[in-house]
Amino acid sequence: MTMIQKAMETVAKVLPVSTLDPRIGADGAVGKPMSRIDGPLKVAGAARFAAEVPLPNLALASLVYSTIARGRILRIDSRAAKRVAGVIAVLTHENCPKMAPPPSFMLDPNGIAMSELAVMQDDEVRWNGQGVAVVIAETHEIADHAASLIHVDYERMEPTLEFERALSNAQVPQKILGQPSEVKVGDADAAFTAAPIRIDQIYRTPREFNSAMEPHATTAQWNSDGTLTLYDSQQYLLPSRHTIAKAYGLAEEKVRIIAPFVGGAFGSKGVCDHHFHCIAAARLVGRPVRLVLSRKGVYWLTSGRTLTKQRVALGARPDGTLAALIHTGSIPVASRNSFMEPFSFVTRFMYAADTLTTSQTFVPINIVPTGAMRAPGEAPGNFALECAIDELAVATGIDPVELRRRLEPEKEPASGKSFSSRNLNEAYRRGAERFGWKDRNLTPGSKRQGEWLIGHGVASASHSYVRLPCSARIRIKANGRVLVQTAAQEMGMGTATVQVRHAAERLGVSVDQVTFKYGDTSLPKCPLAGGSNQTASVVAAVRAASDVLIEELLKHVSEDSPLAGIKSDAVVARDGGLYRIDDSSRGETYISILKRSGKDRIQCEADAPPASELLKYSMHSYGAQFCEVRVNAVTGEIRVSRWVGSFDTGRILNAKTAASQFKGGIVMGIGQALTEDAMFDERNGRFMNRSLAEYHVPVHFDVPEIEVMWNDIPDPNTPLGLKGIGEIGITGVAAAIANAIYNGTGKRIRDLPITLDKILLA
């Protein structure tokens, strides 16, 4: 048995049951380990993904990508392609059906397009790799071959590609995710200048590709009644429906997106150009069309994380407390890009300081529109902030864990709001004990085993709590089976498993009596699967719908029922029915209630209550990341050898899938720290490592045994006391590794990824 399995068993035995939900009793199963309900389908190959849906008369599409970074298309020679047997049509800007600019969430709260520019509506080329033609054919192989025969002539224009050179033209965004781009508390510049201890450094993070196991794929079908159906690899169902409907001038109910299984997304599977290419191709040829991006196409055409250049300046006293905290910087984005990587947000709530300034700017360049990647903003921003805090620990001679304890704020520094719950110090205490932090290497570069220098590092993890509007429909049938429906998305994080268990617990039935239907815009509204919001949002909706259902069931009990005349707050759901709280022996099963009322089913739908908790409190998940690294003193090779992640994320709903989520985020953070770098050629605007052979994500050899643990202290102001866990695992990882490398070698690397050449040249 591995250490992580032992830890999971230990945690599962001590999971406290939240008293925040009166319908979940002390014997409830919520929180205990449970295997994913969709696992058997995926193992058996029975789970159909977007590229596997069978449709009659299906055509396949392949893209032709631009080879210049900026200019105009003078001529597209598709004659040779059209002569290939099996080619149906070639789509270009000259014959593309008309569409309007898609709404982005910068201008439309329901939009999700990464760019506000209409696709293939003119001859302009805006980045190297932009789609300029689509070949539609009878098979994918024919489409790919024909696409290789298309020749495009361009009028080249001078692109903007060099970020550092363009910084002089940096612009201030009006808003970032609806928040001000600059926050000031007091005069941080003056306080910094006057501080006796000053840390002032530049930190850099590179461009990164979202590299999900399943490449982006969509199948578009225009129906005879003018409606549009998409079978899509998608994590933003309703925002994507809104975006596509607006672009084509359709009512939203005329667009249906079906995405029950998604093979990973990490933020990138919203509306990208390939959706419009596929939809336009289907309209052009009058039959369903499928477009599956190659890995090269994913990197050229869909949103990844942009690079950042960040300044963190700390003005401190000898005891480590902060007189000034400054976090500023800039990012490059595409022209009319709608997403601004919010790297400065993390600094607004993490540490106490007398004065505070956070701000950021952007520089438009000719590059594919960038977007969200796991823990957008907080992953790169956390790296800079947590490295700076470690540098302050070195400068003051204070233990890095103790320094963070001293900087623990009583209220959110930027807003003055009270924290809904914040037990970060407890996570640090438990994590430090488990890791053996007291035995860490105290002197940088002093611990060695042969050629290997050994270092220990730590960093805080954090991510905001979000709950968005959501609805759920619950149906109970005459046989006692329960169907729960909402337009959620399952990308591998265990949403369906958690919601089935929660619904079973709320209604007092066994898990195998509950079916959870999701992944379809025809179902009740549900927010996007991102920002660690979906579990809390759906839990609140299921809770509301189950309350309505119980009230409706009580309306249908017969006059001689033990439940006659009783109110919903006087019953508890258990053993497949409703039972009186004042006399647990008196009640009636759902099967009996429906049979005696002559109903074959009772169905109710409800909206989750507004997320008023977000107006009252500063709400975040937290964690402490501890790691050990080994650095070869001769070659500079870096190996992460040990990891403990200790988290404060409210109540955990499923110990098994939660552990997997935390570990997956940590693995992704190891990639951020050591291997991932989307190499951009500033001479021609082309990405150079457009495959998983050259874009290096962590493999088994790169990843140590990872141990995760959590406080499991419920937040009193959230549904079931939970917070989000999907994003937080990656945060703090890169900084912990960088800090451990300094501790092991005495070399401070502030530029990700940390590769052996940077170690040797430092």
Image (cartoon, grey):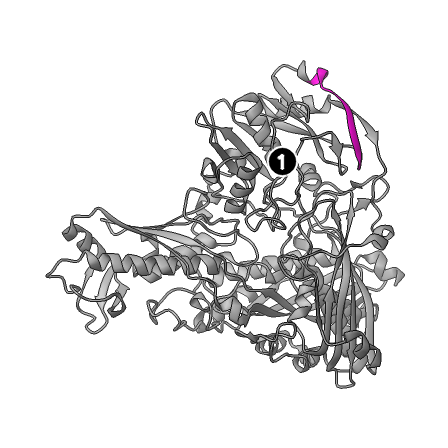
Most extreme residue toward the right is 761
Looking at the picture, does residue 342 appear above or below residue 232?
A: below
Left or right, 604 with respect to 525, comes to: left
What residue does disc 1 label? Answer: 274
Point out the image quarter for the C terminus. Answer: bottom right
Residue 72: % across, % down: 78, 30
Residue 321: % across, % down: 73, 82
Nearest the eye: 168 or 693 = 168
SS at circle 1? helix
State the image quarter where residue 127 is shown: top right
Left or right, 206 with respect to 506, comes to: right
Q: Residue at 41% of width from left, 56% of height from top?
A: 499
Nearest the eye: 503 or 335 = 335
Nearest the eye: 256 or 177 = 177
Left or right, 741 with respect to 525, comes to: right
Task: Specify whether residue 629 is in view.
Answer: no
Looking at the picture, does residue 719 appear above or below residue 693?
A: below
State the image quarter where residue 25 is shown: bottom left
The magenta segment is 70-81
Task: Specify whether residue 54 is in view.
Answer: yes
